[in-house]
Amino acid sequence: MSYLSIVPTEVNHRTILHCSDAGVAYPDREGCSWASTPLACLSAATEYLYGTVILYLTKPSSLEADPLIELCSLLKHNRHTRHAAVLAVCTARNRRTVESLKTAGADFVVFRNDLPAFWKDGGPVSPLNQLKEENRPEQVLSRLCRHLHYSPTPQGNELITCGACSDWLVLGPRRLGELCETSRHPDCPHFQHPRFPK
């Protein structure tokens, strides 16, 4: 088995450690180091001082995000690593995942569906541009409807339903993208007049 070096390189006195649940790892460059597993990431983060740890959650199901969410919690509760900012990059807008990341102590959460380009574009500069207040977990949650409910499917995905409609309304990508997963969700009539099971 080949060994991928995770020794960081200084860039503007900040270093970045990347870890993906897809097992992806790129060669170290320009202040960016890669760990291909959560365990390797935790090992590297405790051995070296990183300014930022970026976790890439590529699975659509919130249940599959558990290993990186647990890693986030370990990083933020370890005296050797809690100083590092943790940025979670998610491929799916999943309220349950963001809530779990907030509980785990993630500092920032962003959504990207172009991860290969995001990984390769601009070295460490592009990720560091995401460390802003609008990407704090509580701010992200304010833009996702609190009535979103997730149920696992046999295919490993999740069925998303509207809790304000007693979960009888199944939400598709178009409605989610136009309303439920945007700052416009309070305008939804179901949000304004929820009907819960008696």
Image (spheres, grey):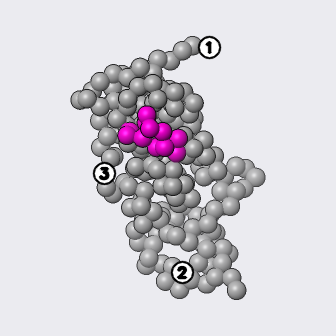
- Give the quarter of the figure containing the C terminus: bottom right
The image position of residue 2, as x and y in percent, is 57, 13
Q: Residues within 10 Å of mark 3 (few under 14, many from 20)?
A: few
Q: Is residue 73 magenta?
A: yes
**Chain-order first, disc 2 or disc 3:** 3
- Which residue, given by chain and number where applicable, does mark 3 sit on? 132
Check disc 2 and report its element: helix, strand or loop.
helix
Q: Residue furthest front?
A: 79
Q: What kind of residue is marked 3?
A: Lys
Element class at badge 3: loop
Magenta residue span: 72-84
Query: In the rendered image, which quarter is residue 68 located in?
Result: top right
Q: Residue at x 52, y 32 (%)?
A: 42
Instruction: Name the magenta segment's main secondary structure.
Output: loop
For the residues labelled 2 and 3, say whether their Cβ atoms are less than 8 Å apart. no
* x 49%, y 47%: residue: 90
Q: Is residue 1 above or below residue 51?
A: above
- Number of the front mark, 2 or 1: 1
Please rate how many residues cluster around mark 2, counting C-alpha atoms within 10 Å: few if below 14, some from 14 to 19, many from 20: some
Q: Residue at label 1?
A: 1
N-terminal label among 1 and 3: 1
User: Which residue is at 68% across, 82% downward?
Assistant: 197
The first of marks 2 and 1 along the sequence is 1
Query: Is 121 left or right of 61, judged from the image as shown?
Result: left
Question: The disc labelled 2 sits on which kind of residue?
Answer: His
Q: Secondary structure at mark 1?
A: loop
Q: CA distance from mark 1 to mark 3?
A: 39 Å
Q: The N terminus is located in which quarter?
A: top right
Percent across and percent down for residue 36 are 54, 28
Residue occupied by mark 2:
190
Q: Nearer the viewer, residue 183 or 7?
A: 7
